[in-house]
Amino acid sequence: MFRQDSSSTKGDEAAPWGRRKTSVSKRGQLAPTPLSTIPSVYFDENFRLENPRVFDVVSEHTEVVRQPMSTIGGDNIAANSDPQPTRKTLATYTILQEKLSWYMDTVEIHLVFSISQASPSFFAALGSLRELQAEATDSVAKIQNLRNDLAHLDKEMVVRGLEIIRLKRRRVNLTKLGEATKQLQCVLSGASHCEELVNSGQLEMAMQHVSYVEQLASGTLDPKIGGELHWLLPNQFIRLTDLRRLHALGGLLRDIDQLHLRIGKGYEARLLDVLLGDLRRHVSDAPPRNTLARWTKSAQGATDASSLTCLMMAEKLREELTPVLQGLGHSHYLAAASTTFREALIREMKSLIRQHLPSSTDEESESSASTWAGGRRPTKQEMSSVLSRNLRALSPDDAEAFFVKVYCGIGEALRRLSVQVKVLLDITSGMKTSNNVLTSVQSPGSKGNPTSRSPSLSMGCNLQEEITHALDMSSLLEQAVDKAQSEITKVLRVRTEQTVHLGLTDFLSYFTLNRLFVNECEAVSGHSGETLKGVVNNQIHTFIPILHEVEKQKLVQKIESEKWERIDFKPQDALTLAHVVQSMTTDPPAWLSYTDLSAAVLETGELKLQKTHTPAEPTTAPKQNKKEPALAVIEGEKFTLVDSAVLALRGIEQYTILLASVPGMVNDISTLLIDYLKLYNSRAQQLILGAGAKITAGLTNINTKHLALASQSLSFFIALIPYVRECVRRRPSMTGSGIAQYDRLKRLFQDHQSTIHDKLVDIMSSRATVCIREMNKIKWDDEDEVRRNVSLYMETLTKEALTLQRVLSKYLSALNVSMIVGQVLTNYKEQWSKAFEGAAIQTEAGKARLLRDAELLESKLGKIDGGQELGVHIINIVKAKKVASQP
C-alpha cells in the first residue's frame, strides 16, 4: 500500500523540484538553514532506510490508517499481545516525504555554498597542474636526448677508459704482488736467520731480529731502520704490505712463536746458570767455621762485617742479571722462568742436604746388592731404609760434622738467595716497557679473539708490573726455608734415638747449631719454622731426663763403690768449683763456650771439653806422703772430699751448664738438679749411717774417719747449695716455689750432718759405757790392784778420745770438731762423774789407786779443749771421797 502511494505521488513530486530550484536561488542570498535542524539519524554511517528500526525513527513512529478487522480477531490480538506505545496515525506519508525533501534541500544548499566558497582555489590548482604536466613532458624529451648522448659517450669513451684503468690497476697489483713476494721471501729468510742466531746462542740479537721480522711481516717496519737491515731487506724501497692475513704465513708465525719460546728458554737457562752458579760458588767459598762465627756474633748482637763483601759481589751479580732479566721481560717468559727457578731452587736445597748424606761402605753395598734378587734395582723404600741405617750409624763426631756442613750450606744459600732477591727487585724496579720491541703482529682478523693470539706476540701493558708479579720473592724465601727445614726435619727424626743419648757437650753443640740455624732462617725469610723447632724441643725434653738418669747411675755406682778415703782435689775440679761459685752472679765464659760455635772455640773447644769432662780417677792420699793434699775451698773455707763428692760436683756443673744453655727449661732442670742432690744425700745416709758401705764397698766397719768424711762432704754441699740457688734464681723463668726447694734441700743436708755428729757422740758414749762396766768390776782395795799403776779401761778411753779428736781435726773444720768433742766431753762428765762417785773404796791405798786413773784422764784429755776441766772435775770427785777409818 505504501508503494502504491509512493507511485501515485510521483506526479506531485515533479512540481516541487521546480519550486525547490527557485526557492534555493532565492534563499542563496540568505544564510543557509543550519544542519542542526536535520535529525542525527540521517548522519549515521549505518543509515539504511530499509531497516525497519531506522524507518520507524525516520517516520517519527507514525503509521498509515488501515481497514478495521473483525472484532473477534482484534480482541484476540489485544488480549494476546503486549501493550504497544502510542503511535501517530496518518492517512499517507506525504508529510514525511516533504520533511525528507526539506532535509535534502538543506544539505544541497550547504554543498552549493561550500563549493562556491572553494571554487577559485580549485581552478587555480587545476591550472597549475596543467602547467606542470607541460613542463614534465618537456623534461622527458630532454632526458631522452641526454640518454642518447650518454649512450654514445659510453660506447665511444667510457668503455675504453675503464679498460685502461683496469689494465693500470692490474699492473699496480702485479707490482704489489711482486713486492709482497719479495717481502715474504725476506720474512722467510729473516726467520731462518733468526733461527740460526738462536741455535748459536746469540739470544739478544735473535730477539731483536725476530722483532724486525715480525714488523716486516706486519708491514710496519720503519723505513729508516729497514735501510740498515740489509740482511733482512736488501731493497729498502719495497713498499711493505701486511702479510699476516695470508694463510701461507700462518706456519711462519707459529715458527716465530717457537723462536720466542726458544729465546725465552735460553734466557731461562742463563738465569738459572747465573743464580744457581752464584749460589753454589758462594756456598763453596764460605767455610763452615766462618759461617758459625757469623751466626754466633749475630746471636750476640754484633754487627756483620761481611756485608761489604756481599755488596761488592752483588754488583757483579747485578751486571750479569740485568741483560738476562731484560731479555726475559721482552720475550714475555719471565713468569715461566720464575717458576722454573723456584723449582730449581727447591731441588738445590734438597741437593745441599743429599750431597752430605752418608753413603754405604763397599762391604755394605755388596751385602745390600746381594739381598736384592736378580740384581734388581732397589725400591725407594729400600733405599730409604739403607739411608736411615747409615744415618743412625754415624758417630757423634761424624753426625756433628754432617749437621755443620748441611746447616752452614743451607744457611749460606739462603743468605745469598736473599741478596739475589734484593738485586732482582732492584733491577726490575728500573726496567721500562720497550714498545719498539714488543710490537704485536696480531692479524686484523684476530682482534678481540684471545685464542688466536700467541703468548709471545701478546702486548704487555707494563713490564715492571709483570716482572714484579712474576718475581714474588717474598714467598720464594719462605718456600726455600720450608723445603730445607722439611728435609732436615726428616734427618733429625731418623737420628732422634742417637741424639737423645749424646753426651752433654755433643748435645749442646747440636742444640746450639739448630738454634742458630733457625735464627738465620728467621732473619732471612721472616719464617721461623715451627716444625724444626718442635722436633728439636721434643729431643731436648727427651734428652734432659735421659742425661739425668745417666748422671744418677754414675753417682750411685760411684758412691756405692766409695771407700770413703780422702782424695786430692785436682786443679780441674777446683776450676769446676770456681765456675759453680761464679755462677751465683754470672755465667762463666767456660759454660758459655758450650753454646759458642765460633771458629776459636771450634779449634780448641773439643780438646778443652774432653779434658773438662774426663772423670778423675779415685785417688787415696798415700800414707807415707807427708805433703798435705789439695782441698776444696769455698770463700776461704776448706773441705776434705771423697771421690763421690767430687763426682757429684761435676754432676752439678752438668746441670748448671744446662741451665745456662737451655733457658727455656730452667724449672725442669732445677727440679732434676734437686733430685740429683737428694739422691746423693739419701745414698750417703744409707751407706754410712745405715752401714751399707760394708756390703757395697766391702768395708770392715764404719769408723770415725768415714763418718768425718761423710760429714765433711755434707758440709761442702751445704756451703755450695746457696751458690747453686742464686745461679738458678737469676733465670727469668724460674718460679719462687722452685727457689724455696733449695732452702729445704739445704736443711735436709744439715739434718743429715747433725745425725752424723750425733752418731759420733753416741759412739763415744757407748764406748764410755763399756769402760764404766770394766771400771765397776775392779776391786780398788785389793793388793794386786793397789800395786797396779793405771787401769786398762782408762787407757782405752783416753786413747779413743784422743783418736777421735785427732781424726776429726784432720777432716772437719775446727767449729765442727769443737762442737762434737764438746758434746762427747759433756757426756763423759756426766757418765764418769757418776762412775767415780759410785766407786767403792775403803782404804787410802784404794783411793790412791782410783786417783791415779783420774789423774791419767786429766793428763791425757787435758790436751783437748775442755778435757782438762773434765779431768780436774773427776780428780776433785776422787779426792772428796771418804775412806773408812782403820780398825
Image: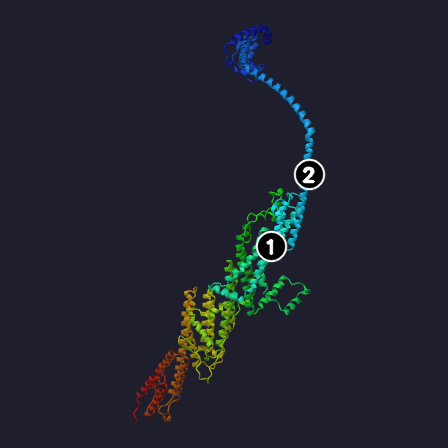
Please give the name of the residue rendered at 61% of the width and 64% of the height, measured from the top-left corner.
Answer: 385
Above/below status of 521 relative to 678 = above
In which quadrant will I find the N terminus? top right
Above/below status of 315 relative to 768 = above
Look at label 2 and name its amino acid.
Arg
Which residue is tagged 1? 267
Mark 2 or mark 1: which is in front?
2
Nearest to the observer: residue 30 or residue 468: 468
| Res 492 visible | no
Nearest to the observer: residue 807 or residue 885: 807
| Residues under numbered marks 2 and 1 in contact, where contact means CB atoms less than 8 Å apart | no
Residue 412 x/y as whole percent: 54, 62
| Res 15 visible | yes
Residue 728 x/y as whole percent: 43, 68
Element marked by disc 1: helix
Residue 452 x/y as whole percent: 62, 45
Q: Earlier in the sequence, mark 2 or mark 1?
A: 2
Looking at the rendering, which quadrant does residue 90 occupy? top right
Residue 766 x/y as whole percent: 40, 82
Nearest to the observer: residue 296 or residue 830: 296
Per the model, the C-alpha gap separating discs 2 and 1 is 47 Å
Look at label 1 and name its amino acid.
Tyr
Looking at the rendering, which quadrant does residue 147 occupy? top right
Q: Which numbered marker is on residue 649? A: none
Nearest to the observer: residue 521 or residue 392: 521
Element marked by disc 2: helix
Q: Which numbered marker is on residue 171? A: 2
Looking at the rendering, which quadrant does residue 10 occupy? top right
Q: Is residue 525 left or right of residue 180?
A: left
Q: 10 Å neighbourhood of mark 2: few (<14), some, or many (≥20)?
A: few
